[in-house]
Amino acid sequence: MYYMPKDHQGSLAAVIHGNTVERLSYDPWGRRRNTSDFGYDNVTCTFDRGYTLRRDDYAGTRPNHHLYGGKELQDETVAGRSLEWYDFEARMYDPVIGRFLSTDPLANDALSWTPYNAMWNNPLRFVDPTGTWSIDHIEVSVDNNNNYVVQNGVIDDDLNIYIVEDGIRTGEILGQMVTAYSFFSDQGNVITGAVIDPNNNSGRDFLEQIKNEDPNLLTYIPNAVHEGKYDFKTSETIPNGMTLEKHANRGMPITENENYTVYGTARDIGNYAAGFVSGRNGLSWNETRIGFDAYQTGTRKLLKGEWSPEPQVSQAAQRLGFDAGIKQRSYDIERKKQLTPSIPHLKR
């Protein structure tokens, strides 16, 4: 059996058959960089034009053409020259010039760009799975329950949630994410298959509960883990067939801004609440970070003696909650002053 891992762009990175049979490296635009013969793990690899795998001593091995972006290489010979284009479904792509060879069917939606551009001229940041639009942040499709299922995404400063149908954007925006890291894993990978339910208000209710109950740190901390009262990630039963990661990243509305409904994950809501409680109880952000990171270290890497700060997906939501907690603390103090009757000074 062949194992063929991919890189962050979806490009084939290696071919493994017991040993590493072939390693592949590309420049950002998709041209192969390791095109000469070389060996790995005492296995000599021979490339035909540096693009296809040909192994004389592995009987039955076929050339592999799905390389850059996972797309199929078209290396037919025309007029004595190999095309070496990639089939991106809607269009052919030439990695030598970093451009598509025909216009984008959705070019009217981006009139300030050349219709031949690929990955918005930034293939390290964007990918283009269909040859029509590059992924900005996350894209979702509608399921049979009128919920939205995460399909693709990369981390950047675009908070919009784009709706797609058959992999192509409809032009509709569901809303915005509460942080740039919503619906992403600790490693920065999009949680494909996470479900966003626009009618699930449990997150809003939970944050309102935290605000009304105003727990102190001694009450909050032991109840925010291990399915405790304030452990929102586990507040709902995991549906059959769903992984814990997808369940923890189930999406729901949190608030509204001027233009959109703002969505977050169950994980975001739990982290926001933790930051809110910390800020409302008067801790500084540095004290908050030390506490959260110490807990992370204690639960994950204490035995290895390694300091393990929380990932950005946790920190971003915690910071939003912390800032809101600081504002709430100031409001609480001012409100208490207004409600406390003044005692006139006694004259001697």
Image (cartoon, rainbow, N blue to C red):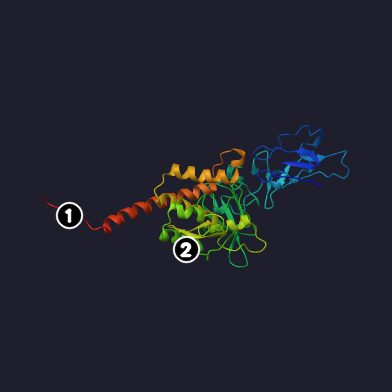
Q: Residue at x 58, y 45 (%)?
A: 120
* Residue 316, x across and y down, in percent: 50, 48
Look at the image and tell me whether residue 217 can be seen.
Answer: yes
Image depth: mark 2 or mark 1 in front = 1
Pointer 2 local density, CA inside 10 Å: few below 14, some 14–19, many at least 20: few
The residues tagged by marks 2 and 1 sit, at their Cα atoms, a distance apart of: 42 Å
Figure check: 178 above or below 78: below
Amino acid type, mark 2: Asp
Percent coordinates x, y for residue 259 in the rendering:
45, 58
Q: Quadrant of residue 93?
A: top right
Q: Earlier in the sequence, mark 2 or mark 1?
A: 2
Q: Looking at the picture, tell me which residue is in the foreground, 217 or 241.
A: 217
Task: Judge by depth and name the residue closer to the eye, 325 or 200.
Answer: 325
170 up-or-down from 180: above or below: below
According to the image, label 2 marks what residue?
A: 205
Q: Which residue bears the numbered disc 1?
A: 344
Q: Amino acid at mark 1?
A: Pro
What residue sits 52% from the left and 54% below the top?
268
Mark seen at residue 42: none
Residue at (53% x, 46% y) in the render? 295
Q: In this view, which residue lies farthest toward the left?
A: 348
Q: What is the total number of numbered labels drawn onto the structure image? A: 2
On the image, the x and y values in percent for residue 255 come to 46, 59
Q: Is residue 150 visible?
A: no
